[in-house]
């Protein structure tokens, strides 16, 4: 229920200019979620919502988004810290990481949203990335090499 409510909150704050917790609670109650102001307060904290100014000088709730460069730096740091080696077999890229780091490195690669990567799976110290083509696998290897060097 909480996951559905959180998804609805994000949908509502994108659709409407919601300024207060009470307003958000009213919208949620109209949508069939029976909530109190205390529940909404916890949800706002869990979702890390923030208030942003509107064109008319008022404020509304919005999803807090870290800056692109701030996020990219974090992912690059994780990739550098966890990377050990990589090799490819056709369009499949195998990345070796430090023990226990594969999930973090894989999540960083996924967050970079490179179009060449169709999907990836992480074990304890190995990641398998499925790449669209052999040429794009080589391009991804080049990107990773530039990041880690």
Image: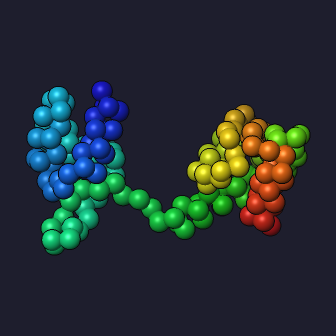
Is 59 drawn above or below residue 6 in the view shown?
Answer: below
- Residue 85 position, x and y percent, is 85, 50
Left or right, 82 with respect to 69, comes to: right
Where in the figure is residue 71, as x and y percent of width and height? 54, 61
Q: Give the image location of residue 38, x and y in percent.
A: 16, 41
Instruction: From the viewer's side, name the closer residue of 53 and 91.
Output: 91
Instruction: Decide if residue 18 is on the left or right side of residue 88.
Output: left
Residue pictured at 80% horizontal, 44% vertical: 133
The answer to which quarter of the image holds residue 57 is bottom left
Q: How are the colours assigned in the image?
A: rainbow
Q: Quadrant of the N terminus?
A: top left
Residue 142 vs 42, above or below: the answer is below
**Residue 94 seen in the figure:** no
Q: Residue at x 17, y 37 (%)?
A: 28
Quadrant holding the C terminus:
bottom right
**What residue do we see at 65% from left, 50% from top?**
115
């Amino acid at each position: 229920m909480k996951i559905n409510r959180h998804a609805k909150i994000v949908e509502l704050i994108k659709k409407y200019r919601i300024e207060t917790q009470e307003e958000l609670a009213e919208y949620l109650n109209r949508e069939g979620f029976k909530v109190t102001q205390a529940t909404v307060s916890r949800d706002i904290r869990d979702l890390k919502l923030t208030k942003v100014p509107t064109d008319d000088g008022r404020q509304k709730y919005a999803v807090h988004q870290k800056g692109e460069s701030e996020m990219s730096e974090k992912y690059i740091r994780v990739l550098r810290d966890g990377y050990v080696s990589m090799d490819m077999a056709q369009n499949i890229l195998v990345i070796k990481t430090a023990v226990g780091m594969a999930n973090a490195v894989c999540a960083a690669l996924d967050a970079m949203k490179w179009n060449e990567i169709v999907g990836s799976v992480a074990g304890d110290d190995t990641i398998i990335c499925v790449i669209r083509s052999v040429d794009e696998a080589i391009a991804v290897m080049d990107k990773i090499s530039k990041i880690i060097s």
